Amino acid sequence: MRIFPVIIGLLISTNVSASEQASSGTPKAKLNFVVTHCWGEPIEEAVIRIVQQGRESRLEYPKSRNIEVEPGTLQIIVRAPGYAPYSEVREVGSGVRLITPCLLLSEPDGAGDPPRFSVNGTVARMLISDELAWVRLVGMYSDFNSAALVDSSGSFLFNAVRAGRYYLMLFSNGQLKVAGEVSLRNFEKRISVQPGSITTERD
Amino acid sequence: MLNALDTSGAKISAAAAQVVFLNGLISEDTVASLYAKSKLAEAAVGQYGAKKISEHITEEEGGKVRKALAELNGNKIYLNPKWWSGGQHYYDDVATVMHELIHNVTGLTDDDFISRGFEDFSNVLKTKCF
């Protein structure tokens, strides 16, 4: 049984060392990396590739954890034994930045980027009023950070979520009402927000 | 090819003598148990929770079905009988068994096979071995 492999390395380029990348005179972006599993387990070894303007740099993580690059758009590709390949494109400015890719296990019989999914949630009636209410979902081990409005029926929706551990906060009228940790999986992606608790349910 | 995966024909033969085939459609084992004998065990418990093989093996993702699931570093292979037809697909089935045995022996996943240069591993096995 196979699942479609995903081609993640679209740019073929020359390997350039970190020191070469840092040699020009413009202000640089210093990228620090912490790579974990999306439930927090440390990753013993990974290769991080940074592709920018057709040039590629490689970090052998965790021996190397940081690199200086030109500010701008870059693609970050991470591969680790036993884990599905990870890829993202992001914009970085000058200065120091911590990047925290979280990896998901590769299935024994399945290859490629694990699917992203939509997360539906409901907020208990007693927690919502006529005031504007919203929820914020933050990845505990990833850089995910997104907010969604709670509608008048108490429902909210997040799209393109990866499996992992998150922290959900409910705000109403600018006040934090309820907060808690949730584990989201593609088969367990319904969030229920009750007074004092946040839980997930199967579809 | 087997050298590139840090294994050998002798190891695969030995694994074949020990393998246990199970009906994935009725298995109460968890998906996380596939990783229990690997260093990925704790991560698997987080990622898959209590999800059962019987739930997982019938899911289709991206138009792809699950024909079999192998225990990493173990001897269990869970089958989805729906996709084992024999006949003109006999050599596909044999290649799939070999594919799963290699998971059993090496503890490597399909993404690991790709990292080592083997895309569409079952087809590679079918072409080279059968």
Image: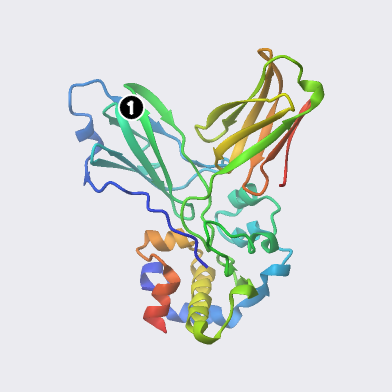
* Above or below, comparing residue B66 to residue A13 in the picture: below
Q: Residue at x 36, y 29 (%)?
A: A91
Q: Residue at x 27, y 24 (%)?
A: A28
Q: Residue at x 42, y 28 (%)?
A: A98
Q: Looking at the image, which is closer to me, A23 or B83?
A: B83
Which x, y percent locates residue A202? 72, 46
To which quarter of the image does residue A66 belong?
Answer: top left
Chain bearing mark 1: A
Q: Looking at the image, which is closer to me, A86 or A41?
A: A86
Q: Which residue is mark 1?
A: A30
Pick out the residue farthest to the front: A152
Pick out the residue farthest to the right: A126
Which x, y percent locates residue A80? 43, 50
Q: Secondary structure at mark 1?
A: strand
* Above or below, comparing residue A41 to residue B55 in the picture: above
Q: Is residue A168 left or right of residue A102?
A: right
